[in-house]
Amino acid sequence: MSPVAGLAGSRRRRALRACCSAVAAAAFVLAISGCGAPGPRKADAVLAARNFQTALNGGSFGRACALLAPETRQEVAAADADGCVQALPQEHLPVASGAVADAVAEVYGRQAMVRLSGDTLFLSQFGKGWKVVAAGCTPRPDLPFDCQVKGG
């Protein structure tokens, strides 16, 4: 093998290593920042769940409806000719109590389950933040949760 051929092979290996390193670095950056770091996303999901519960507990049904995911809001609104604000109180969702610190959240990508004292909520992350997709959810053995309010 000529010295020139060896040099070309060495350059290719270095270029390949550099390329692989760049791809690995890019994949790592996307993995940790693509949907945001888990800690802040979890805190944001808990905050959205608490805001929803606070709105319900305070009778601010317009605010609570604004915190529902679009399909869920449409489902709730379909129950009353006057819309979500009139229909939501008729759902008699459980009253959740306790501080934000008492909430337990599990985040899976753009989905979250937040357990509060008295209720379990399911949320999805939208462009403008976390929205409640299901509320008033109770676990069932070997079955999905049963939720009073949910999207279609």
Image: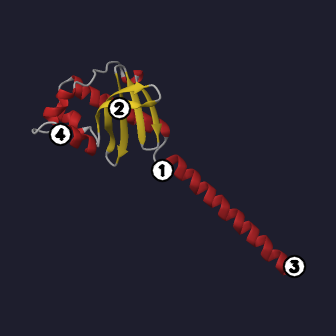
Sequence-first tag of 1 and 3: 3
**Which residue is under mark 1?**
34
Separation of disc 2 and disc 3 at Cα? 65 Å
Identify the mark at residue 77; answer none if there is no mark. Answer: 4
Sequence-first tag of 2 and 3: 3
Identify the mark at residue 3; answer none if there is no mark. Answer: 3
Residue 73 position, x and y percent, is 23, 40
Question: Around disc 1, counting alpha carbons within 10 Å, would you say few (fewer than 14), some (14 to 19), or many (20 or more)?
Answer: few
**The N terminus: image quadrant:** bottom right
Residue 23 position, x and y percent, is 61, 60
The label nearer to you, 1 versus 3, is 1
- Number of marks drawn: 4
The structure residue drawn at horizontal position 74% and vertical position 66%, both measured from the top left corner, is 14
Separation of disc 3 and disc 4 at Cα? 77 Å
The structure residue drawn at horizontal position 15% and vertical position 35%, both measured from the top left corner, is 85
Residue sitting nearer the eye, 96 or 6 = 96
Q: In the image, what residue type sits under mark 3? A: Pro
Q: In the image, what residue type sits under mark 1? A: Gly
**The C terminus: image quadrant:** top left
Sequence-first tag of 2 and 1: 1
Sequence-first tag of 4 and 1: 1
Separation of disc 1 and disc 3 at Cα? 45 Å
